[in-house]
Amino acid sequence: MEYYTGQLLGLPNGIHFRELVCKWTLKGDLQWARALVEECSDTLECVDFEWAAPPMGNSDGAASFDLSKATKLRHAVFRLHRDYPIWITMALKTIASERTELRISLHVPVYRGSIASSFDVEVVRQWADLEYTLIRLWESHGVRTRVVYDPGEEKAEAREYIERLLPEVMRRGIIELVVNFSSQ
């Protein structure tokens, strides 16, 4: 990712993406994705981030994106591969207060192991912080969130899993649950 990002950032007239899709599998790639977001912040309308790297704990809270300068941003998509959403929460906390037309989509992995296992304290804390941030965005800006999940063979259990991750936003009805059957 470093080589290609360096080439893009070195273009004489800069880069002016309206849509930016980033997937990274190494923590080191994050700095380059961050640089792209920063460089395109004047024109970005949609970001689609996929974190496939090892999980992040408290010490990795800075491993996120600053979306405060992306004033034209209308849609932010976050795709998780694991149960650690701290990077999403950190990015959402940077959203400027004047946002009113922003849509957020969370793609949450649901797999047999995640449904069957109980959450550790760190996972529960990170999801509670994300939920609080989503509630704050809803109350202050009217930002609605779509949660997309693939239930696999565990249809009823998958929905319950999402409800355990985000109980308050589910209770308030401020998220839209979308079942994705495309991978079946």
Image: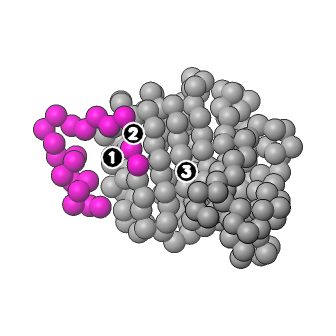
SS state under label 1: helix
Q: How is the image coloured?
A: one colour
Residue displayed at 26% across by 61% down? 2
Count residues near mark 3 (Cα–Cα under 10 Å), then give few for <14, some for 14-19, many for 20+: many
Q: Position of residue 127 (x, y in %)?
A: 71, 56
To which residue does mark 2 refer? 19
Instruction: Say whether residue 170 is visible.
Output: yes
Decide: marks 3, 1 in contact (CB < 8 A)?
A: no
Residue displayed at 36% across by 30% down? 42
Disc with the residue nearer the chain's start (3 vs 2): 2
Give the Cα separation between the discs numbered 2 and 1: 11 Å
Q: Along the horizontal axis of the image, is 57 left or right of 177?
A: left
Q: Amino acid at mark 3?
A: Phe
- Magenta range is 1-21
To which residue does mark 1 refer? 36
Residue displayed at 36% across by 41% down? 38
Give the Cα separation between the discs numbered 3 and 1: 16 Å
